[in-house]
Image: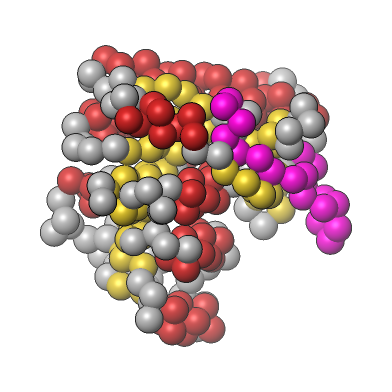
C-alpha cells in the first residue's frame, strides 16, 4: 500500500514569505502522493481591519458573520491558495487548489448557534475523494483551503486542522496515511517559553495527564483532539512540529500515538 502524506501548515508559516517559500520548495520535493492543507494566517484579519470590519474571536476561534465569510473566502480560497499553487508550479510540483465546494469534496453543516454562535462555521459531515484520487493518480497535488460547503449553496468557514484530519481519514482505506501538523514550534512543549522542551511522544494516557496538569493550553487541545481522532480512524502516523520534521526524521518533533 502506498504512503500518502497529508500536511497542514499553520498561519505563522503563511505570514512569513521567506518561510513559506522555503517550505513549499521542500514540499515540492517530497516523493510520493501528498496533500497540503493551509489556514489563512493574519491576512484575513488585516484585510478586515482595513475594511473596518471587526474581528471577533471566541476561545481562539473566529466568529464568521456574512461580511467576514466574504473576506475569508477571498483570502483563503483566493489569494493564499492560488499563491501557493503558483509557487508550487514554479518548483515543478503540478497542483490544483481546492475549497470544499470544488468537486463536492468537503460537505459540512452550519454549526448550531447554541451554546455559542460562531456564525457561518462548518462542521464536516462528509468527505468525497473520487475527484482527488483521479488527480493524485495523475501526479497532481491537491492544495486545500479551509472552506467547506453545505451542498445548499452556502460556503462555510471550517477549522483547517479538522480539514486535514478528515482528509487523512477519508484516504486511509486506499493509502497508508501520515498526517503532519506543521507550525512555528518544534512540537508540543512541556514549558511554553522553552523551545527545546519538546514532548517527543504523547499517547492517550499522557494526553490526559498533560491536560490535568495544564501543561497543554487551550489552543493546542483542539489540534491534539484531531490527532487522536485521526489515529482512531485508521490514520497510521500523526506528528506535530516544524516543517523540518518532514525532511529530517532526527529533528525534534512530537509524535502522537495510541496506547
Task: Look at the image and tell me whether residue 186 can be seen.
Answer: yes
- Where is residue 103 drawn, in percent x and y? 57, 27
Q: Residue furthest right?
A: 114
Task: Look at the image and tell me whether residue 240 can be seen.
Answer: no
Q: Identify the image's colour scheme: rainbow, by chain, secondary structure or one colour.
A: secondary structure
Q: Nearer the viewer, residue 234 or 71?
A: 234
Above-or-below relation of 131 to 204:
above
Q: Residue at x 23, y 18 (%)?
A: 92
Q: Residue at x 27, y 23 (%)?
A: 93
Q: Nearer the viewer, residue 167 or 238?
A: 167
Please identify the quarter of the rendering in which residue 132 is found.
top left
* Residue 177 shown left or right of residue 249 in the figure: right
Above-or-below relation of 101 to 83:
below
- Where is residue 211 drawn, in percent x and y? 52, 78
* Residue 157 shown left or right of residue 97 in the figure: right
- Bounds of the magenta segment: 102-120
* Residue 128 shown left or right of residue 207 in the figure: right
Residue 106 included in the magenta stretch of the image: yes
Amino acid at each position: 500500500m502506498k504512503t500518502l502524506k497529508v500536511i497542514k501548515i499553520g498561519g505563522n508559516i503563511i505570514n512569513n514569505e521567506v518561510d513559506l517559500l522555503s517550505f513549499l520548495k521542500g514540499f515540492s520535493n517530497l516523493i510520493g502522493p501528498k496533500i497540503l492543507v493551509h489556514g489563512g494566517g493574519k491576512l484575513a484579519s488585516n484585510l478586515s481591519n482595513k475594511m473596518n470590519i471587526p474581528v471577533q474571536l471566541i476561545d481562539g476561534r473566529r466568529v464568521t458573520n456574512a461580511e467576514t465569510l466574504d473576506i475569508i473566502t477571498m483570502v483563503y480560497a483566493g489569494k493564499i491558495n492560488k499563491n501557493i499553487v503558483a509557487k508550487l508550479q514554479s518548483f515543478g510540483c503540478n497542483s490544483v487548489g481546492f475549497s470544499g465546494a470544488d468537486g463536492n469534496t468537503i460537505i459540512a453543516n452550519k454549526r448550531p448557534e447554541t451554546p455559542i454562535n460562531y456564525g457561518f462555521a462548518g462542521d464536516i459531515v462528509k468527505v468525497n475523494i473520487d475527484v482527488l484520487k483521479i488527480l493524485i493518480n495523475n501526479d497532481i497535488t491537491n492544495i486545500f483551503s479551509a472552506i467547506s460547503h453545505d451542498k445548499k449553496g452556502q460556503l462555510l468557514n471550517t477549522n483547517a486542522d479538522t480539514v486535514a484530519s478528515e482528509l487523512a481519514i477519508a484516504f486511509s482505506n486506499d493509502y497508508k496515511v501520515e498526517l503532519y501538523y506543521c507550525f512555528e514550534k518544534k512540537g508540543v512543549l512541556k514549558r511554553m517559553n522553552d523551545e527545546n522542551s519538546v514532548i517527543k511522544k504523547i499517547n492517550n494516557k499522557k494526553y490526559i495527564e498533560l491536560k490535568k496538569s495544564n501543561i497543554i493550553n487551550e489552543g493546542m487541545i483542539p489540534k491534539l483532539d484531531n490527532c487522536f481522532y485521526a489515529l482512531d480512524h485508521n490514520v497510521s502516523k500523526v506528528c506535530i512540529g516544524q516543517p523540518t520534521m518532514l525532511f529530517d526524521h532526527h529533528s525534534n518533533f512530537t509524535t502522537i500515538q495510541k496506547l
